Image (tube, grey):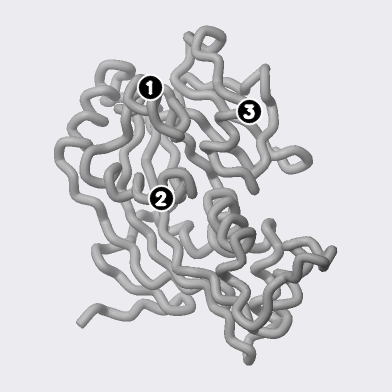
């Protein structure tokens, strides 16, 4: 019904977990459970500029500020609290290149926007968005502050693109380990830039499909609504944030568990 989460895989990486826990012990008293109030689960999506970074992160963890300096990747680790914010840049790029137009393509003389054309294809059930994947990361946000230079972000832009025109000033935010920006007119949607890579632990790889069946036209129309997509995906993934009852290689089809064979 819009999105089908087909697999959620637990990431077992002892090195990264030990690094995360050791860093926590340096910053806070873990014998006091109050530190858990600063733990959050955030999303790391595939940036079109570095689509395979997700795989590298699963094996080696996120890089440092200096590690990312020579790459398109932001020097700080970009994380978001909504799946739509993690996915919209990848989907926009897909349709901007024309790869997703299954039955027809925009002529040079047409004045329709990509968004209008996309909505028409969704209404006809002719849309084919490639499967997506993201990382669900545990992050410690104790020393966090709002970005005073660039208070807002556009979720339609990839983190690498955002960093080009609105990078984080490390000197201005030297006293914190992360800063955040909000979506204009929707402060609930946020992007964080984490400067300490040891405080971000990738815990789950989520893989999903976009459904585009003509018999489900009314349902697939919701793909064009960022807020609706955000709400539905967060609802399906809330077990990660609240109960953490997701097991290795668990399959989900329209909300029902299906054991692997």
Q: 152 and 24: which one is in front?
A: 152
Residue 37 visible from this viewpoint = no
Tell us which disc is closer to us: 1 or 3. Answer: 3
Q: Is residue 86 above or below residue 198?
A: below
Circles 2 and 1, Cβ within 8 Å, touching? The answer is no
Q: In this view, does 219 lie above or below 77?
A: below
Q: Name the residue under label 3.
A: 165
Look at the numbered disc 2 and give the secondary structure of its residue. Answer: loop
Residue at image position (52%, 37%) is 160
- Give the distance between the C-alpha atoms of the residues marked 2 and 3, in whole angstroms: 20 Å
Q: In this view, does 251 lie above or below 15?
A: below
Q: Mark 1 points at which residue?
A: 65
Residue at image position (73%, 43%) is 186
The image quadrant where one finds the C terminus is bottom left
- In the image as oriented, which residue stretches furthest toward the left? 14
| First along the sequence among labels 2 and 1 | 2
- Give the distance between the C-alpha atoms of the residues marked 2 and 1, in whole angstroms: 19 Å
């Amino acid at each position: 019904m819009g999105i089908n989460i087909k697999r959620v895989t637990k990431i077992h990486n002892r090195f990264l977990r030990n690094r995360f826990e050791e860093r926590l012990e340096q910053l806070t008293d873990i014998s006091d459970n109050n530190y858990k109030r600063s733990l959050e689960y955030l999303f790391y999506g595939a940036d079109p500029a570095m689509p395979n970074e997700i795989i590298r992160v699963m094996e080696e963890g996120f890089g440092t500020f200096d590690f990312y300096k020579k790459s398109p990747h932001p020097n700080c680790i970009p994380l978001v609290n909504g799946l739509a914010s993690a996915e919209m840049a990848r989907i926009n790029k897909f349709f901007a290149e024309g790869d997703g137009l299954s039955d027809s393509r925009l002529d040079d003389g047409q004045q329709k926007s990509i968004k209008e054309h996309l909505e028409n294809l969704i209404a006809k059930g002719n849309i084919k968005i490639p499967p997506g994947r993201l990382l669900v990361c545990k992050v410690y946000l104790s020393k966090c502050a709002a970005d005073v230079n660039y208070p807002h972000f556009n979720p339609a832009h990839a983190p690498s693109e955002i960093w080009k025109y609105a990078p984080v000033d490390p000197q201005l935010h030297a006293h914190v380990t992360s800063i955040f920006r909000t979506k204009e007119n929707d402060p609930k949607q946020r992007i964080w830039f984490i400067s300490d890579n040891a405080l971000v632990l990738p815990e789950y790889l989520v893989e999903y499909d976009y459904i585009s069946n003509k018999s489900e036209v009314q349902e697939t129309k919701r793909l064009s609504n960022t807020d609706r997509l955000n709400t539905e995906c967060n609802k399906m993934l809330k077990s990660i944030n609240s109960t953490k009852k997701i097991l290795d290689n668990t399959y989900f089809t329209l909300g029902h568990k299906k054991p692997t064979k």
